[in-house]
Image: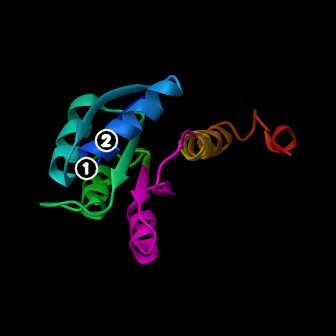
Amino acid sequence: MLKILIVDDSLIIRKKIRKIVETLGHEVVTDATNGQEAIDAYAQHKPDLVTMDITMPDMDGITAVKHIIANDANAKIIMVTSHGQEDMVIKSIQSGAVGYMLKPITDDKMAQAIGEVFIEYAVLENDDELDLTEDLL
């Protein structure tokens, strides 16, 4: 079970992501409505994963990613974005995010995004001990 921080300025989106995350068996430690709240919540809760909206008031997701990564280089942040924001996704990845999901969010998209992040990091961290390549094919 992962501890997850949800960041989005839309209450509807936060509730939807919470429901999906909990259905997948993970815990939502808290949520935030803008980048500054995300930075503060990350520092307080140290989640395993953050879902981060890009476009938010006060402080956008890209700026928040930069601050979180500056304080914890191992932070795992998945950007949540709408179609048409590809350039912002690239900036997010360059800033330290490890992946992205396109809205609308579904159970399958969330499960895939989480799986990709944590399988990739498991392989990188245990490269000498673990080879999942054959298991994934």
What separation in Å lies between label 2 and label 1 (alpha carbons)?
6 Å
Quadrant of the rendered structure where residue 46 is? top left
Q: Which mark is residue 10?
A: 1
- Residue drawn at x 32%, y 61% is 54
Pointers 2 and 1 in contact (C-beta within 8 Å): yes
Quadrant of the rendered structure where residue 42 is? top left
Measuring from the top left, give residue 136's x and y in whole percent.
Answer: 81, 42
Q: Amino acid at mark 2?
A: Arg
Element at badge 1?
loop
User: In front: 102, or 29?
Assistant: 102
Element at badge 2?
helix
Measuring from the top left, give residue 101's x and y in whole percent.
Answer: 50, 55
Magenta-colored span: 78-107
Which residue is label 2 attached to? 14
User: In front: 15, or 54?
Assistant: 15
Q: Is residue 131 above or below residue 71?
A: above
Measuring from the top left, give residue 131's x and y in whole percent.
Answer: 80, 39
